[in-house]
Amino acid sequence: MVSDHIVKSFDDDLNHLVNMIAEMGGLAERQLADAISALSRRDEALATSVITQDKRLDMLEEDIDAQVIRMLALRQPQALDLRAVIVALKISAELERVGDYAKNVAKRTLTLMQAPSINPATNTIVRMGTIVGGMISNVIDAYLNSDIVKAKDVRARDADVDQLHTSLFRELLTYMMEDPRNITACTHLLFIAKNLERIGDHITNIAENVHFLVAGENFDDDRPKGDFSSSTIVTVEGNTP
Amino acid sequence: MVQALKVSETLTNAPIKAQARGVKVFYGAKQALAGIDLDIPENHVTALIGPSGCGKSTFLRCINRMNDIIDGCRVEGDIQIDGVNIYEKNQDVVQLRARVGMVFQKPNPFPKSIYENVAYGPRIHGMAANKKQLDEIVTDSLTRAGLIKEVYDRLDSPGTGLSGGQQQRLCIARAIAVKPELILMDEPCSALDPIATARIEELIDELRHNFTIVIVTHSMQQAARVSQRTAFFHMGELVETGTTAQIFTNPREARTQAYITGRIG
């Protein structure tokens, strides 16, 4: 464990920063869980609450920005301290973005309530949401405990999210072709799935930041990728050449 | 993602100007340096950092044998400059100090005119054949030290009448007038205000293209600003040396980390 600074208030500043990140992480995780739960239960009140709660994440990010700028100016942090301050700045930006995606899921949930539900696809989205939610929780643990192994594990799980996204993409295109009345709902579900896939990417960035914080260097390998939705084509049966 | 160090920054391909191997210094019975191995690359600024009493100034003074004049001081090991051990018996110390100049913590101009301060070294080393050549050396040195514009019309005024920052630049002009290969600086800015400090730092950055500079500083920000390589001393040991960017973003040794982040002093 790293010992305390000679100037005690420097430690207080750093601890405050870490606590704010922990709070943001917990909040982002809950926002996502609530958004997914609102989607699966068609819960209007919960979806609305997710939308209004997003402001808290935005405010926390602003507080962290201010704290980081203050510390850079007044403490001139070096080495591990410098990495801690910079990484806090970057992680807070990632978590703020996670919150935006959760908010967008909630907005689309409100819209989806006016369309027929597409249950099998919704179930897959709930599964994606559970994986991504677990990744947020674990990456914050990895951050708080300087746990590189855990960070690496979180990063590896993003490939599962990518694969689910690709299969969901195919599934939703198929429903749209089966019945054009599904198109509105399916399109919103596609965006929701994309939101979750993007959240996975932001969590992966956080995992990489944790590695840099602890080790002073980046992961030495490329991250595993599994999202092939950009090149996915589903053709109507009977029309295939 | 953040990449703290570019590969080019982690490698120093510059030739080694000075090389210390197993340098131990004793003041009487007390050992001040525990056996220092350090390479000093040519045309680079090497910063020596560490808490008071860590041995950094002692090591600096070994490089031009300034410790010779301290009673009871004994130096072991060797320091080579361009492959020649400066502690060999037949080494001419006066000649050595012409090759290895020094700038001290407090500006210490001679109680003479600005001109004489700079002309003194070249004259005793017989570097000028006539007055015209000496004038050229003085003007050139004052120009390189960034002082000429401020003093060109009062070269006969006493050097001690200049401001602290100007006096320190005069001392740098005096040091470079004898065309040294290395310049040692022992906390050259600690008695100066931030503006005068910035001027000296800018000057150090220019001088390194023609000289090899070793600087001892208590200001870690200064080490970070002016040097390309940093060596961290602690309790008479050289704990870690590396590129300045590496030392200040990702030091390898726990003691270095603790010192530069303000955890030990």
Image: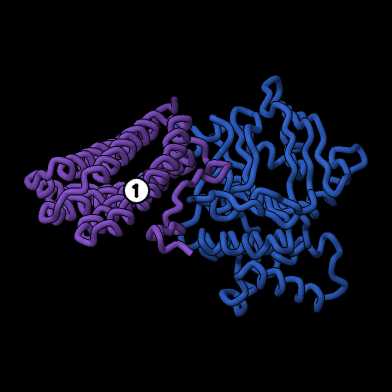
Chain colours: A purple, B blue
Q: Quadrant of residue B48?
A: top right
Residue B138 placement (x, y as % from top left): 72, 71
> Could you tell me which secondary element the residue under label 1 belongs to?
helix
| Residue ID at (56%, 74%) | B150
User: Does residue A81 sit above or below B197 in this rendering?
Assistant: above
Residue nearer the viewer, A177 or B9 = A177
Specify whether residue A111 is in view: yes
Q: Is residue B8 left or right of residue A180?
A: right
Task: Give me the chain letter of mark 1.
Answer: A
Q: Residue furthest front?
A: A238
Residue A53 placement (x, y as % from top left): 14, 47
| Residue ID at (86%, 41%) | B85
| Residue ID at (46%, 58%) | A231
Residue at mark 1: A168
Amino acid found under the numbered disc labelled 1: Leu
Residue A37 placement (x, y as % from top left): 18, 40
| Residue ID at (66%, 73%) | B143
Q: Is residue B57 left or right of residue B22?
A: left
Q: Quadrant of residue A46?
A: top left
